[in-house]
């Protein structure tokens, strides 16, 4: 039998029983749609988290005081478990590293900010002019902290969007004097609102020069040093150089933790990638169920069409022809169902994106290919058994049923 | 004239529960090409089994069947299918048309299965439709046709591959006398063109029209009568 004839014949057979065909296609479509939508959800979550982390700044290497447990047991830790301070001098020393493009020290504490009669508790970040570039932040008004000697700083403050709104409301904030802790600062800039983020929320932050913050909190240590490497490739060199320099300065003891954003990202990426796979696996079960349904329905169809099969044999159809005809029919139904399911799934993902615009719910390519492929393979695989059954049918018995 | 069909020592046994039913016992038969044979006998006499055997739809338990000098009982199922396709045409009592296909598609079905190109199919179907007076029924489905028209479609289908023989199982059984007569005339015309015609019937009047009558009883041949062909 020629291929176009086979396809025409299978199409005719499928159209001959619309209810059966519709149900089969529906089952297949639901299976594939489930795969597409669920993987879109899983991969969307992955992209969302990765995106949020990237917004912290790119090529970032973060230095924390103290040795975290990630390094395993270190005999040095057993003897001295109070780490040395991470100082502004340490930060300045890191500028010597060749892989470092720029860096910003960060000291953090809480204090009160007041203007007029209004008073509010705020988180105070002491840092330098580079902070805004390293963290990729934006200003809404004015300017950021002035560049200059890290050890001395003018009494200037940059306030977060929410702080500005609560303290100044509609009146201009720039140039106003505010009191933070026991010092007076002049407002030189206002940060742009960043909305919700995974990192530190700058909307409720006030930023002052690092030297003043350390004086205010009466402490020498830094909370973090944010280091930006020149490029993605220089993140690893930057990490080793930073570690080496700190080690030298701290009498050979590695008492800081250096983490890269990449490492954090990679962990989340892996975690959520696995989640997507798991979800895809669950969805694949529904595909397998659809495949078994195809088999059942095709088996029933063989019994219903015994007379026709017997006739085809009497008219000279070989067992192979009949087998092929049934497999083509099963494959055609599966493929149609899979395509409809794919469109439904894409529609569902688009709807998700419409409802949650921040959530990038795009099904990954591999999931689409795997979904369509599984549908086709199960359809054909489960079509083989009924097809063989049909081909084996005794024509005399088949014709005998009148 | 060479023998078209040579059956020798054919046995066919069906197992019904514990008992074995001998549908055909030690059957010997020779049919020449171009003959017009009626197989007659009461129900259960084995005439349908014989027809299925002749049509390669069934296999004997013993004996040999030579069709056009070739032993066909030992052929593989694929080769038997080819023999059915090229050499044998079936006409059934209940027509056995595919309900979802049009008259033209039903007639073309054996050619479709044999893989004949569409334009050749089209040519042959058009001629067959004209020959059998179905030209204006080409795109009708079986349920839109009368019984006589359906059987004419079935005969057109049986002859479309130009077989050597036509096996007809009670071809008029579901038709009234007038349309039955019509169908018989068609089949006899084909026989006149040299196609071997074998008809199974229990209608004695119908059987009497054949030039040779085989009377069967309990799975064996009781009488083999030849009436001289009346020259018309």
Image (tube, rainbow, N blue to C red):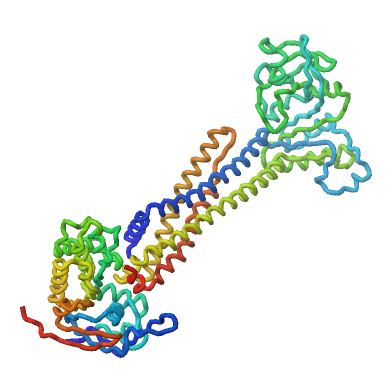
Is residue B178 shown above or below A206? below
**Which quarter of the figure has residue B139?**
bottom left
Which residue lies most toward the right here? A79
Q: Which residue lies at the image location 17% right of the left edge and 66% below the top edge?
A: B176
Q: Which residue lies at the image location 78% right of the left edge and 32% below the top edge?
A: A225
Residue A253 visible to an observer of this rendering: yes
**Which quarter of the figure has residue B179?**
bottom left
Which residue lies most toward the front here? B42
> Residue B131 location, x and y as percent?
14, 65
> Residue A77 location, x and y as percent?
90, 44
Q: Which residue lies at the image location 55% right of the left edge and 45% below the top edge?
A: A364
| Count of numbered marks | 0
Out of A145 and A290, give the one closest to the viewer.
Answer: A290
**Which quarter of the figure has residue A125?**
top right
Which residue lies most toward the left here? B232
Q: Assign the N terminus of chain A to one quadrant of the image.
A: bottom left
Q: Assign the C terminus of chain A to one quadrant of the image.
A: bottom left
Is residue A67 shown above or below B74? above
Left or right of A233 in this view: A6? left
Out of B41 and A141, give the one closest to the viewer.
Answer: B41
> Residue A205 location, x and y as percent?
74, 23
Residue B124 visible to an observer of this rendering: no
Is residue A322 shown above or below A73? below
Left or right of A1 in this view: A247? right
> Residue B42 location, x and y as percent?
26, 80
Out of B29 and A270, give the one closest to the viewer.
Answer: B29
């Amino acid at each position: 039998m020629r291929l176009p004839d086979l396809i025409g014949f299978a199409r005719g057979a499928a159209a001959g029983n619309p209810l059966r065909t519709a149900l089969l296609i529906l089952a297949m479509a639901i299976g594939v749609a489930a795969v597409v939508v669920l993987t879109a959800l899983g991969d969307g979550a992955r992209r969302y988290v990765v995106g949020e982390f990237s917004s912290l700044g790119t090529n970032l290497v973060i230095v924390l005081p103290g040795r975290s447990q990630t390094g395993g047991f270190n005999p040095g830790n057993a003897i001295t478990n109070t780490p040395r301070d991470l100082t502004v001098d340490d930060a300045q020393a890191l500028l010597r590293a060749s892989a470092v493009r720029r860096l910003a020290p960060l000291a953090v504490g809480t204090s009160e900010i007041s203007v007029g009669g209004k008073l509010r508790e705020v988180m105070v970040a002491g840092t330098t002019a580079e902070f805004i570039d390293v963290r990729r932040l934006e200003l809404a008004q004015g300017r950021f902290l002035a560049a200059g000697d890290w050890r001395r700083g003018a009494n200037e403050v940059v306030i977060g969007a929410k702080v500005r709104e609560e303290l100044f409301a509609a009146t201009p904030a720039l140039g106003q004097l505010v009191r933070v802790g026991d010092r007076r600062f002049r407002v030189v800039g206002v940060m742009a609102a960043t909305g919700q983020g995974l990192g530190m929320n700058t909307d409720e932050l006030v930023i002052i020069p690092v030297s003043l913050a350390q004086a205010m909190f009466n402490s020498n240590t830094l909370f973090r040093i944010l280091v930006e490497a020149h490029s993605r490739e220089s993140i690893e060199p930057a990490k080793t150089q930073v570690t080496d320099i700190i080690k030298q300065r701290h009498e050979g003891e590695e008492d800081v933790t250096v983490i890269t954003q990449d490492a954090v990202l990679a962990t989340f990426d892996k975690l959520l990638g696995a989640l997507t796979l798991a979800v895809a696996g669950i969805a694949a079960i529904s595909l397998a169920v659809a495949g078994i349904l195809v088999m059942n329905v095709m088996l029933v169809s063989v019994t219903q069409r015994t007379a026709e099969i017997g006739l085809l044999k009497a008219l000279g159809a070989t067992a192979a022809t009949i087998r092929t005809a049934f497999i083509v029919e099963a494959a055609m139904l599966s493929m149609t169902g899979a395509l409809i399911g794919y469109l439904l799934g894409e529609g569902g993902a688009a709807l998700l994106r419409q409802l949650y615009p921040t959530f990038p719910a795009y099904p990954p390519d591999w999931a689409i290919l795997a979904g369509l492929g599984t549908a086709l393979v199960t359809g054909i695989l489960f079509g083989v058994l009924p097809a063989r059954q049909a081909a084996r049918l005794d024509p005399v018995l088949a014709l005998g049923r009148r | 004239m060479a023998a078209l069909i040579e059956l020798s020592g054919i046995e066919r046994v069906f197992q019904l529960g514990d008992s074995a039913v001998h549908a055909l016992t030690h059957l010997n038969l020779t049919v020449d090409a171009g003959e017009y044979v009626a197989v007659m006998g009461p129900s259960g006499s084995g005439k349908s089994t014989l027809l299925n055997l002749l049509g390669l739809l069934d296999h004997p338990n013993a004996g040999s069947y030579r069709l056009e000098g070739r032993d066909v009982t030992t052929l593989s199922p694929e080769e038997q299918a080819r023999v059915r396709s090229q050499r044998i045409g079936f006409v059934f009592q209940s027509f056995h048309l595919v309900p979802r296909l049009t008259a033209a598609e039903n007639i073309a079905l054996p050619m479709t299965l044999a893989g004949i190109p569409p334009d050749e199919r089209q040519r042959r179907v058009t001629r067959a439709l004209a020959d059998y007076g179905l030209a204006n029924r080409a795109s009708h489905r079986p349920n839109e046709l009368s019984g006589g028209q359906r059987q004419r479609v079935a005969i057109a289908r049986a002859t479309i591959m130009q077989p050597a023989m036509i096996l007809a199982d009670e071809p008029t059984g579901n038709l009234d006398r007038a349309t039955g007569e019509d169908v018989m005339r068609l089949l006899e015309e084909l026989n006149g063109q040299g196609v071997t015609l074998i008809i199974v019937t229990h209608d004695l009047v119908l059987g009497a029209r054949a030039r040779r009558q085989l009377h069967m009883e309990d799975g064996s041949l009781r009488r083999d009568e030849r009436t001289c062909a009346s020259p018309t």
